[in-house]
Image (cartoon, rainbow, N blue to C red):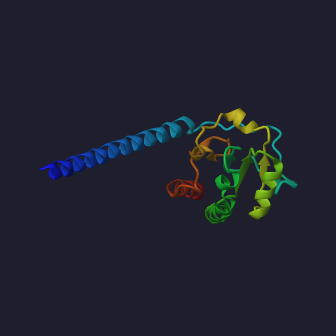
């Protein structure tokens, strides 16, 4: 009798833990979905302000001009929190840029704004990954000061129109659904 009681108690305890975990998981999913909806609504159509003195370089050396008036622009912002290299994933961006170039009717300007801990770190990352696209090393983090970007990295990448208004928010490198949204918008 005692063994039966212990087994039942263990079964009930495990069942309750599974039910509680499921409820927590579902409520977190609803919270995440709600947060995503709120961010998209808040940023859709918002105009991004760029610092007037943005200097773009290739691997932190050669200064280059970028087309701030392009029909489509993809803004990628990475701040100094955490592992910059892990968050940038420059090799995946190189692949995505090639894909965008193959479907776009007009050239798309990629605007990488990096607010690293140091210029040396940014140069090292771009050289190591052989990343030869223009990047603005924004040591004063001016672009974030002007726009007050969301805290979540997921919302630090934007597809902009010619007037710098947000068409899509989200990182196409981390999310395939967002990637398809970008490619569809650019190919039209």
Q: Within the image, what quadrant is residue 164 found in?
A: top right
Tell me residue 115's x, y (percent).
Answer: 74, 44
Report the front residue among 169 and 78. 78
Tell me residue 2's x, y (percent).
Answer: 15, 49
Asked if residue 22 can be seen in this view, the reply is yes
- Give the residue furthest to the left: 1
Tag count? 0
Asked if residue 66 can be seen in this view, the reply is no
Q: Within the image, what quadrant is residue 173 found in?
A: bottom right
In the displayed structure, 88 sits above or below 148; it is below
Residue plotted at (78% across, 48% down): 136
Tell me residue 67's x, y (percent).
Answer: 77, 50
Q: Within the image, what quadrant is residue 85 found in?
A: bottom right
- Give the residue furthest to the front: 2
Locate residue 45 relative to residue 163 in the image: left or right.
left
Tell me residue 139's x, y (percent).
Answer: 80, 41
Report the front residue among 120 and 50. 120
């Amino acid at each position: 009798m005692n063994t039966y009681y212990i087994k039942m108690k263990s079964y009930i305890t495990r069942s309750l833990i599974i039910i509680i975990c499921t409820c927590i998981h579902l409520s977190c999913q609803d919270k995440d979905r709600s947060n995503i909806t709120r961010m998209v609504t808040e940023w859709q159509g918002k105009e991004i302000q760029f610092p007037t003195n943005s200097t773009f370089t290739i691997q932190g050396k050669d200064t280059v001009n970028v087309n701030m008036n392009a029909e489509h622009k993809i803004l990628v912002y990475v701040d100094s929190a955490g592992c910059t290299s892990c968050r940038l994933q420059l090799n995946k961006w190189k692949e995505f840029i090639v894909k965008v170039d193959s479907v776009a009717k007009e050239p798309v300007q990629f605007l990488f704004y990096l607010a690293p801990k140091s210029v040396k770190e940014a140069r090292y990352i771009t050289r190591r990954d052989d990343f030869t696209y223009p990047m603005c090393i924004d040591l004063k983090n001016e672009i974030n000061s002007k726009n007050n970007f969301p805290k979540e990295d997921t919302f630090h990448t934007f597809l902009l129109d010619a007037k710098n208004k947000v068409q899509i928010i989200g990182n196409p490198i981390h999310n395939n659904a967002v990637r398809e949204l970008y490619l569809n918008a650019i190919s039209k």
